[in-house]
Structures are given as C-alpha cells and as structure tokens.
Image (tube, rainbow, N blue to C red):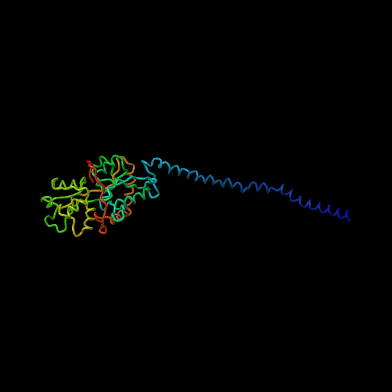
Amino acid sequence: MKQLRFLSFLLLAGTVLVACAAPAAPTATSAPAPTQAAAPTTAPKPTDAPKPTEAPKATEAPKPTATSAPVATATTAPTATPAGLPDLKGRELTVAIENAYLPFNYVRLDNGKAEGWDYDSLAELCKRLNCKLAFKEIAWDNMIAAVAGGQFNLAADGITITDDRAKVVDFSDGYIAVDQRILIRKGEDRFKTVDELKNGKFKVSTQKGTTNYDEAVKLVGESRVTAFDTFGDAVQALISKDADAVVIDDTAGQGYVGVNADKVGLLEGKLVGQQLGFVFPKGSDLVAPFNAAIKAIKADGTLDKINAKWFGPDFKLTYDAVKPGPTAAPTATPSK
C-alpha cells in the first residue's frame, strides 16, 4: 500500500510538474513578452518627458533673475510692483516738515498728535511705493537749504514750485494747484478789489520767506508788508487790526475762513496761480517713483478725498489749538 501510494504520488507529482511547466514554455516562446516590451508603456515615460516640457520650470527660472536685476539698480530704476508702481523695498525716508502750517502739518495740543494733509498724502504715497517715513521737524527758513544739502530725503510743507528753487533742489510733479489770494476781515468796506488794496495805504501781512511774501511786496511794496514767522501770526495780525490784509494760498485761506467765518473772508480775484510739490535733493532717485505714485492717486480719486478732508469746510482747527512751530535760525533760504 505504501508503495502503491508512493507510485500514485509520483504519477500525480509528474502530472503537476508537466502541467506547471507547460505554460512556462509558451510564455518564453510567445512573443507576448517582447510585444509587451515593445509596447512598453514605459516608452511613454520618455514621452512623459514633457518633464522637459516642464522645462518651463527652467524658463521660469529667469523670473528670479529678471526680478532681481532691477532690484540691484533700485536706486536709479526701482523694480515695478504688480500695481505698476516702483517698489522702494521698505526704504526709510527722512521728511523735513514744519508742523506749523494748517492744514498741511501741525501738532495738536490736546493729544500731541501730528497730522495734516502732508501726513495723510505721504502715508498713502509710501503705502503704494513700499517705503517708511521718519518725519523731522525743522523751521521753514532752513528747510529747502537742508534738503539741498542732503540732510533729508524730501520736504513736505505746501511748497510752491518755482524756477529759482529748482536750481538747488528737485521737485515732484505738482500735486495741487493753488492761487494766491487776499484774506480780509469780515465786513471790510474800504476796498473791494485787489487794485483798490494796492492803490490805497493799507498794510499787508504774510509769512516771511515765502512766495506769498514776494507777491505781497510786488503788490504794495516792501514798506507796507509785515512778515511773520507763521501764517497763524499773520492772520492774527489781521484779526486784531494790526494789518488790513493777508497774502496767502487759497487752500490755507479756505481753512481760515472755515474756522473764522465770522471774522475773515477771501477777497474776490487772485494774484497768481501756482503748483505745490514735494522737494528732493538734486538728482534724487525718489523723484520718479513719487511722480508715478502722485499720478496714481490723482487717477483713482484718492487725492480728491484727501483734499476734501483737509481743504474743505469740515476742517475747523485753529492755531491756538496747535503747538507752535520750531524757531527759525537766521538764514537766507529760498521761500515757500
């Protein structure tokens, strides 16, 4: 029995071996394997070689290079930001400011806060240009000379663009057009026109070292002009009857009228129209970026909103509510 079982086992094992070996031969002979090798869906892996087509990644590599090239020359040609404006890369700019010229700049007595048109407009411009601002208070008389000497990156103080000043500093494009006007006391009936003021014996006050002072002298002669350190003092001289008129920019004049509507008003007519601009040292690389940003805030209406806030009837602050400006050191500096 054991032998029979053993023989049966051998026969059965042989059959199994034959059965198992039989497929192996066809597999070796059947060209399926080559055909499968030929059709290799592995060959598509080369065709999958759009990973070279992912050579855009090589083409995108220039992006860092393209961006970094301008960055290296940012001092002369700042890199354009996605908004289409130059990017100053967080650069800190020192700004000369008087803090004594409503509504452009001042410091409140009640909370010590510095505010005004200059602070709002420069904050908006620097937000778009990616820069930081460090304001430094300086008397008006020394401001343009200090910027010309490179002590500041720029100055903001409602500064009129003139050819004489452009010889020593660079200006931005004009951000607002102003007319020089005559501020008078309410109820003034001795003169009703600029010519009548000019032809009488009336006294005129204004701020010293400004284009307003120059116009006042042209209008009535130096002997009839009293110059003060600030426009606030000049207006107080008018209200207290120590002067008969004040030569002032209409933007500032409107503010005085709004605050003292019962005391002062603007005479009909203008003396001269001028543009105000920011001041930079000669050859400054900041002029072009600031011009681009000024153009942008004009185009999208932001500048109009800032102007409406500071030059409109809602502005009611007076000089007795703000800190006095810095004392001027004696110097012959071009005027406002």
Q: Residue 186's image quarter?
A: bottom left
Q: Residue furthest bottom?
A: 262
The quarter in which the N terminus is drawn is bottom right
Viewer-side residue, 175 vs 57: 175
- Whole-percent x, y for residue 61 in the image: 48, 43
Viewer-side residue, 132 vs 141: 141
- Whole-percent x, y for residue 43 in the image: 60, 46
- Whole-percent x, y for residue 323 in the image: 27, 52
- Whole-percent x, y for residue 84 in the image: 37, 48
**Total tally of numbered discs in the picture:** 0
Residue sitting at 45 percent across and 44 percent down?
64
164 left or right, relative to 289? left
91 left or right, relative to 42? left
Viewer-side residue, 72 vs 336: 336
11 left or right, relative to 179? right
